[in-house]
Image (cartoon, helix red, strand yellow):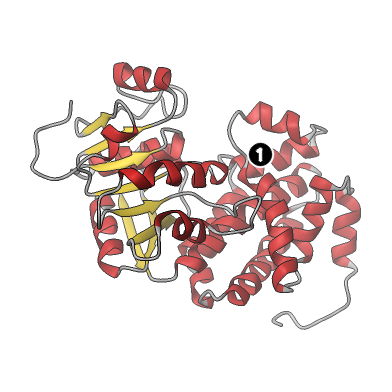
Amino acid sequence: MGEVTATAPIAVLGSGSWGTALAIQFARAGHPVRLWGRDPAQLAALRQDRCNQRYLPDAPFPPLLDIAADLGDAVRGADYVLVAVPSHGFRALLRELAPRLTAGMRVAWATKGFELDTGLLPHQVARQELGEQRPIAVLSGPTFAREVGAGLPTALTVASNDPQFAATIAQELSSPSFRAYISTDILGVEVGGAVKNVLAVGTGLSDGLGFGANTRIALITRGLNELMRLGVALGAQRETFMGLAGLGDLVLTCTDNQSRNRRFGLLLAGGKTPAEAMHEIGQVVEGYHAARALHTVAARVGVQMPICAGLYGILYEGGDAGDVVRGLMSRPIKAEFD
């Protein structure tokens, strides 16, 4: 058990790599944490081993990190709840969580991506499941779980409709090796976190096919332009995309092989099918699913996203990567900033 403290604990729901890393960081910064996941056998192993052997074997749990017996135990008496599950499981968990929340209990998440069936962003799903009045927040930015678990210097963004809630999360995450910045642009932070995964698949595919560094940086730069175009059309603040949750997360995910989405693209370039590549990675590849949802959202708001559309064609319509790249390069000449 963690140290005796008068401070209400933080409930972290989701015991994968990112949920575990955030729980470790909160506890390392001096705040009691209850970590919960759906698999009872995994929870028992976490409790016994005092680390997540599957995802973060080199990151032992600080004393203030406890493993909750069940969802009710995790949430009971918590200061606030932080959800860290893949986007396809986000709504189901919120629906299960809602009756366990007390009046005024705040909810944050580190979930990224559009909901596949509806094209909704996490905050829109949260409003449907938790109501319009509850304080909410999202955490996003250039972060790999393994490096957070190892205590390497890291920065991210916390966005909320309640500035005090964002400030609380940022303060409680912060330590000598971790810095959190605050924002009010929930929509922009979420768009950045969703679209970058799709573009990371593209850069992995491009690199795996040997298209070179010039192509990689062109994909990142023009991909950022597409991300900004969509975000602004949806109502986000343009400057958000030049920060940690936009440009920062995009560059990180596109250029480092710790990114599952980039590795997925590399495996596709090596001849794997999407199913084979996901099986080899062994974790959810958000970019694969996000490409389909993004295709729907872009069409709905009338925003042209040729790179993302090309990736959709490769992933879902059997398109050839070489043909897609050649098609992008032969598009009509236009001003860089439209």
Residue 164 located left or right of residue 206: left
Q: Is residue 121 above or below residue 330?
A: above
The kind of residue tagged 1 is Arg
Q: Is residue 200 visible?
A: no
Q: In front here: 104 or 56?
A: 104
Residue in the image at 34% along x and 63% along y: 181
Residue 31 located left or right of residue 125: left
Residue in the image at 9% along x and 33% along y: 4
Q: Quadrant of residue 75?
A: top left
Q: Which residue is mark 1?
A: 263
Indicate the secondary structure of the residue bearing disc 1: helix
Point out the image quarter for the N terminus.
Answer: top left
Q: In front here: 204 or 296?
A: 296
Q: Is residue 194 visible?
A: yes
Q: Position of residue 323 (x, y in %)?
A: 91, 54
Q: Position of residue 18 (x, y in %)?
A: 44, 40
Residue in the image at 46% along x and 62% along y: 244
Residue 322 located left or right of residue 63: right
Residue 53 located left or right of residue 67: right
Residue in the image at 72% along x and 32% along y: 277
Q: In front here: 257 or 56?
A: 56
Point out the image quarter for the C terminus.
Answer: bottom right
Q: Is residue 328 above or below residue 77?
A: below
Which residue ends up furthest to the front in the rendered image?
99
